[in-house]
Amino acid sequence: MSECYLIPASECVVEEEIKHSRFISILFHCSDPQVMKIQLERVKHRYPNASHYCYAFVCGQPTSSLSIGFSDDGEPSGSAGRPMLAHLQGCDIGEIGVIVVRYFGGTKLGVGGLVRAYSSGIKQGLKILETKLKQLRYPGFLECEYAQLTDVEYYLVQYDAVIEDRVFTDKVKVSFSIGKGQEEALNRDLALMSQGHLIATFTSNTKK
């Protein structure tokens, strides 16, 4: 499993007219199917009374098939959603969704024409879509003295860890997530800082 992959950094919109029909392709970051539902409602509000709102999404890593989906939204079966999904699965970008809005212009395109039309904006959009690298992170936990917290947080920041919670009792319990491969180096620095008293523990479950 890859420890990092590209995801969309911003929304991208491509608009074109094909045989009098208006096609608007919106590509965006989609980390969960619920995000698609929310985006779909927003797009319908932004572009009201369209003939079709077809969509596709890959919510995990680029190669993941666990959280994917598509909709033809009334277009002939296989003419919109499935080819849209195929383009997303082949673009090597994860957590990506696309909605293509169509305003019918009176000319029928046929299944082949629809496949090309619904694919066109996605192909153009993928060429200009801004992306960023997502690092998979794994949960970690440690306990430290109050006086050690500043140093602990310094090292966590140095290793690009995300501090998720601090619980203050007789000691400070720190929950965080960190990229795989950084655990050993972090524990080495914590041990040097605390004369061997501090050690973080990790689990293998990935964090989103």
Image (cartoon, rainbow, N blue to C red):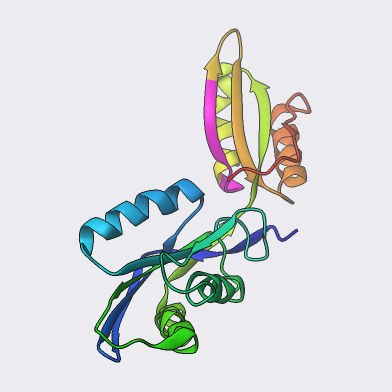
Q: Is 75 or 188 nearer to us in this picture?
A: 75
Q: Quadrant of the N terminus?
A: bottom right
Where does residue 104 sit, x and y in percent of width and height? 27, 78
Q: Is residue 53 left or right of residue 58?
A: left
Q: Is 122 or 146 nearer to us in this picture?
A: 122
Q: Is 111 or 118 nearer to us in this picture?
A: 111
Q: Residue at x 71, y 27 (%)?
A: 194
Q: Taking 56 as reference, is 127 above or below it?
A: below
Where does residue 188 sit, x and y in percent of width and height? 76, 40
Q: Residue at x 41, y 67 (%)?
A: 74
Q: Is 111 or 130 nearer to us in this picture?
A: 111
- Please check the rendered image and state whether residue 163 is part of the magenta-colored stretch, yes or no: yes
- State whether residue 130 appears in this view: yes
Q: Is residue 82 left or right of residue 194?
A: left
Q: Which residues are magenta?
A: 158-166
Where does residue 101 sit, x and y in percent of width and height? 32, 70
Q: Quadrant of residue 200?
A: top right
Q: Farthest residue in the bottom direction?
A: 19
Q: Taking 124 as reference, is 47 above or below it?
A: above
- How many marks the image carries: the answer is 0
Q: Quadrant of residue 6?
A: bottom right
Q: Taking 55 as reference, is 150 above or below it?
A: above
Q: Residue at x 36, y 49 (%)?
A: 38
Where does residue 60 sit, x and y in percent of width and height? 60, 56
Q: Quadrant of residue 28?
A: bottom left
- Please check the rendered image and state whether residue 47 is part of the magenta-colored stretch, yes or no: no
Q: Is residue 58 left or right of residue 11?
A: right
Q: Taking 43 as reference, is 14 above or below it?
A: below
